[in-house]
Amino acid sequence: MPVLSLIRRDVAQAWRAGGAMLPVMFFLLVATLFAFAVGPDAQLLARTGGGVLWMAALLAALLPVDRLIEPDRLNGVLDQLAVRGHSDESVAAAKLVAHWLSFGPTLMLSALPAAALLRIDAGTLVRIEAGLAIGSPALAALGVTVSALTAGLRGAGALGGLLMLPIAVPVLIFGAGALGDGSGSALKLLGAVSLLLVAGAPFAAGAALRAART
């Protein structure tokens, strides 16, 4: 199975099983509940809403972690790919791309109605969208790496959350920090962190896949 076919298959499976919509629904649900919890204070909603959206994006990216690697490990797909000469790093990179395609663009679209619910102004919304475009690949990279590390373990979903949330703190800090930063320095730092995570994730996840096979 070529790597591009693996990406197409994973994205199609995510949409067919409803897994691609689950992060979006969760994202919008968090925004709606927060708006109800805070009440009609528009200034407070606008001041805190951006950080809430970033927290929701982080948790939404975490939801499908236990389904990124484990099904293919159980079905022998990963072993077949290895036998056919595909490196574990290339498989992990394909999983990363597929994971991002299944939740990243839809998450950015969902930020539009969520911003309306939270009374977020247009300028802040632009910075949120820019931050999600830069930071969501990092969240996908962390998701795939954590999924590979926890594949085959009992309670992988809960363990994945415990592993991913602390590592994702820099993404959250710089993403939320960009909302009030007119200079753009927070977005640059977010881009640097995202690039580092995306570049390193295939190697870390690939090593985890090899270790799980031995």
Image (cartoon, rainbow, N blue to C red):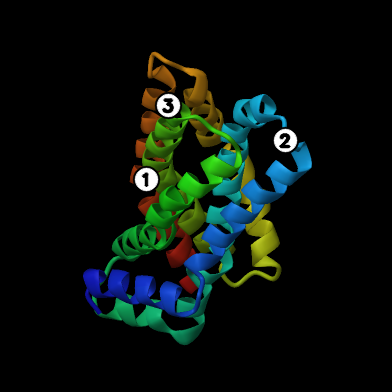
Q: What crowding class fits label 2: few (fewer than 14 Cα within 10 Å), some (14-19), or many (20 or more)?
A: few
Left/right placement of residue 207 relative to residue 33 reads: left
Q: Are marks 3 and 2 in contact (CB under 8 Å)?
A: no
Residue 116 in the image: state x and y as whole percent: 54, 42
Of marks 1 and 3, which one's residue comes earlier in the chain?
Answer: 3
Say the numbered circle drawn on residue 198. Answer: 1
Q: Secondary structure at mark 1?
A: helix
Can you give x and y, in whole percent of width and height, for residue 199 in the image? Answer: 33, 44
Return the x and y of residue 182 as percentages of the image width and height: 42, 15
Q: Nearer the viewer, mark 2 or mark 1?
A: 2
Name the quarter where the N terminus is drawn. Answer: bottom left
Residue on which the image places disc 3: 123
Mark 1–mark 3 Cα distance, whole angstroms, equals 28 Å
Q: Among all residues in the image, which is located at the extreme bottom?
A: 75
Identify the mark nearer the N-term, 3 or 2.
2
Q: Residue at x 64, y 69 (%)?
A: 153
Query: Label 3's element?
Result: helix
User: Which residue does the numbered mark 2 point to in the structure image?
Assistant: 40
